Amino acid sequence: MLAILVLEVISAALAWRDLTRRSDDQIRGKKNLWRAFITINPGNSLVYWVAGRC
């Protein structure tokens, strides 16, 4: 269980870093919405990796 939690936190941190480095036109939607979505549930960072990046 602890390993899953660690992986989710790492994935969320990497998604936040990716959001910071990309320009607005490289992201589907608004960056602030993605940040909130990822923060609500770290598992949502997987959705960002699949659907949020252009």
Image: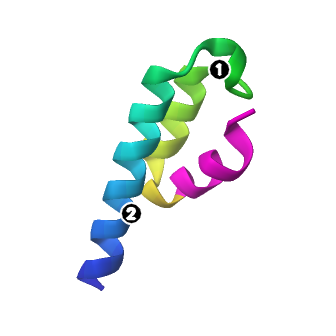
Dot 2 corresponds to which residue? 8
Q: Is residue 1 above or below residue 53?
A: below
Q: Is residue 47 above or below residue 37?
A: below
Magenta segment, prevailing SS (helix, strand or loop): helix
Q: Nearer the viewer, residue 32 or 54?
A: 54
Question: Where's the N terminus, which quadrant?
Answer: bottom left
Query: x%, y% of residue 18?
Result: 47, 33
Q: Is residue 36 left or right of residue 5?
A: right
Residues packed near mark 1 inside 10 Å, few (<14), some (14 to 19) or many (20 plus): few
Q: Which mark is residue 49?
A: none
Q: Is residue 8 left or right of residue 51?
A: left
**In the image, what residue type sits under mark 1?**
Lys
Dot 1 corresponds to which residue? 30
Picture quadrant where residue 4 is located: bottom left
Q: Residue at x 46, y 54 (%)?
A: 41
- The magenta segment is 44-54
Residue farthest along the top direction in this orientation: 24
Q: Residue at x 43, y 22 (%)?
A: 20
Question: Where's the C terminus, which quadrant?
Answer: top right
Q: Is residue 51 above or below residue 18?
A: below
Picture quadrant where residue 5 is located: bottom left
Mark found first going from the N terminus, 1 or 2: 2
SS at mark 2?
Answer: helix
Q: Nearer the viewer, residue 27 or 30?
A: 27
Q: Residue at x 58, y 57 (%)?
A: 46
Q: Residue at x 39, y 63 (%)?
A: 8
Q: Is 25 within the magenta? A: no
Query: x%, y% of residue 40?
Result: 46, 47
Q: Is residue 11 left or right of residue 46?
A: left
**In the image, what residue type sits under mark 2?**
Glu
